[in-house]
Amino acid sequence: MAADHPPLPILFLTCAVLRLVPGATAQPMPADPFESIKSLAGEWQADLPGYGTISNSIRLVSHGTAVEETIGTATDNEVSLYTRDGGRILLTHFCALTPGGHQVRLLTRQHGTVREGLVFDLASAINLRDPAAPHMRRVVMAIADRDHFIERWTQKKAGKDVVFDLHFVRR
């Protein structure tokens, strides 16, 4: 596969965003992927099978140098922070899957775009006492337009990948 073409699963995810979201069209987004994430600031919701409707609150923090995302319900939620790391984006996810909580750090590839889907792969984990404990190892974010985006979370659980998609709609 040529280095300048996105992997097929990412293309499928992008196509799914545009196909599954009524009225979604390829609208111009900021050329800088971090600026595109910043443009998501606001209130969102998605249906998560088995859990119902969840909310997602995205806001700019630290003078716009970081993006804070809180996904879940008022009583059960997780926080992620997106920051620049040179030419890449660092996602630090404060996970509620383990009793003591742990944080995973995921990094984008050097040249990702929001159209292809930004791919965040596991770089490190802290406070994960057992490497076999459930933890997120990949996140793909694809932005369809100003009012629709998908996050595909891949969790390592019992030695297997569990993947779930969150189709967010702006409230």
Image (cartoon, rainbow, N blue to C red):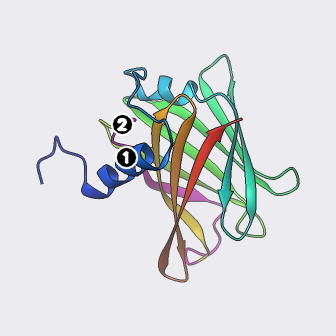
146 vs 157: above or below: above
The residue that label 1 is drawn on is 14
> Which quadrant holds residue 130?
bottom right
Classify mark 2: helix, strand or loop: loop
Q: Nearer the viewer, residue 69 or 8?
A: 8
Camera-nearest residue between 20 and 47: 20
The residue type indicated by label 1 comes to: Thr
Extreme front residue here?
Answer: 23
- In the rendered view, does 97 fall on the left or right side of 35? right
Range drawn in magenta: 114-132
Tell whether position 116 is magenta: yes
Q: What residue sits 33% from the left and 54% below the top? A: 12
* Residue 53 location (% of width, % of height): 74, 55
Q: Is residue 94 magenta?
A: no
Residue lying at the far right of the rendered structure: 75
Assess disc 1: are there few (<14), some (14-19) or many (≥20) residues with their C-alpha within 10 Å of its C-alpha: many
Residue 128, position as x, y percentages in the image: 63, 66
In the displayed structure, 2 sits above or below 145; it is below
- Residue at image mark 2: 115
Instruction: Say which amino acid is labelled 2.
Output: Arg
Image point (78%, 70%), residue name: 99
**Quick one: SS at disc 1?**
helix
Q: At which x and y percent is residue 97?
A: 70, 67
Q: Nearer the N terminus, badge 2 or badge 1?
A: 1
Q: Nearer the viewer, residue 112 or 92?
A: 112
